[in-house]
Image: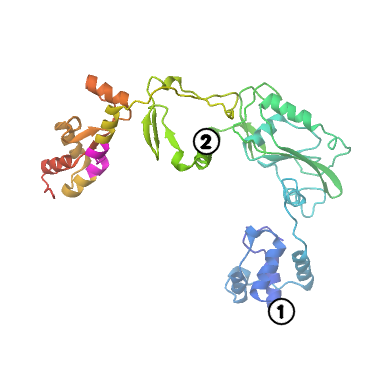
Amino acid sequence: MSNRRKNSLSDVEVAIIKALIAARKHSNQEIAGLINRARGDAASDISSGRISNIKNGQIKKYADIAAASPAEIEALMAKAAAPIAVDDGPLSPARLAQLLPAKPGAPGSLAITETDRVECKKSVSFVMKTIAAFANNKGGYFVFGVENATFNVVGLPDDRFEKFDLNKLNQNIRDQLGIGLEILLATHRIDGKKVGVAYIGQAHTKPVIFIHNADGATQGHIYYRYPGEDRLISSADLQRLIEQRLQQLSQTILSKHLANIMRFGIENAAVMNLATGEIDGKAGSFLIDEALLPQISFVKDGEFVERSGAPTLKLIGEVAPTKATVVAIREALEGYPLSYIELFRRVKKATGAKQGAIDAIIKSKKMKANKAFSHYAFRNNADRVRYEETGVVKRGAASNYNEAAVRLLIKELGGSVVL
């Protein structure tokens, strides 16, 4: 069949459809099913509506295509009736057949190019730079016994590939890259010639970095697989890998916390802020003395390891209420229930004033420092104590407001206060 986009029809397919329509033995749905079955790729399926379009002459570019011959129809029927190959892994026969298609009209040659997934070599030779590049992308394949320029299949003359020491390769990867990778080996026949295929899985943790100078690579370099070549990773691709790693780490930590919450029960779980010492849960809240916070740390032995029955931290002492902090939090949340955004929206709705005008009045009337209108929403007790002792508020500290603040701002901006 001629080249086509995924869901477009080739001239041969159109010719067969016209012949099947003329025979009047198949419904539109059955004809579409035969074409889809012969293609063998669900992503390229066509609908029965396309058959209707051809039957009604609605697609002009197909008008001059003649109906197919009986031999062409028979070939399609045979292809549609063939069992579907099962893709059960990166080296399954179905996957390799798709990865290494024969070139039409050129026996012994492959219809491929070296992509970001395939590296061809005439003899068995693993290149560490390519392994690292595959690992940093989405994995890839070495194909041994195929020339890398012509993609002619020369085959492997002996059993060197079958006897290859995979353990030694894995050791070299750990020595030079500091990681373990999934590596699978298989042989494949193309026009009666044997080729060796090695699948290199992508790394679980990226980026993969050379830890020694080796194999033409420099310590600290990060290689990435681009179409037909291994080269130093671009800044955009490196940034993407770092973002993916951070996201993966966040998901791992979140999954661990959620698992613990479900194990302990929501009513028995709480969240601790290591910066402030605040612990908040469904059953209530309390604070750990700030003097203890520097002593709290997690055990890390290479990787985080849980030791059953051996708690990382044990707090001993009396629980004393921190009245001042509790009062400050209650005042900020109960006596001053409006955030700045809520205050701004209320005042703008009543007066139409812009943010700059509202901010100017808050500043000129010193409303943020006046408890008749506002209360600082301190994030921790230390910030509150510092403010009470020095009168200096930590830069960027947020404030909550009350209804009196709303009325004052509306009055100053010439609006009418609705009680």
- The residue lying at 84 percent from left, 42 percent from top is 155
**Residue 46 drawn at (x, y percent):** 62, 65
The residue furthest bottom is 24
Magenta-highlighted residues: 332-344
Q: Is residue 216 visible?
A: no
Structure colour scheme: rainbow
Mark 1–mark 2 Cα distance, whole angstroms, equals 61 Å
- The residue lying at 60 percent from left, 69 percent from top is 50
Q: For the residue carrying disc 1, how many other residues have a C-alpha within 10 Å: few (<14), some (14-19), or many (20+)?
A: few
* Front position among marks 1 and 2: 2
* Secondary structure at numbered mark 1: loop
Quarter of the view holding residue 310: top right
- Residue 34 on the magenta segment: no
Q: Nearer the viewer, residue 418 or 182?
A: 418
The residue furthest right is 158
Q: Is residue 370 visible?
A: yes
Judging by the rendered image, the residue that carries numbered circle 2 is 253
In the picture shown, does residue 80 fall above or below 220? below
Quarter of the view holding residue 383: top left
Judging by the rendered image, the residue that carries numbered circle 1 is 25
User: In the rendered view, does 406 fall on the left or right side of 229?
Assistant: left
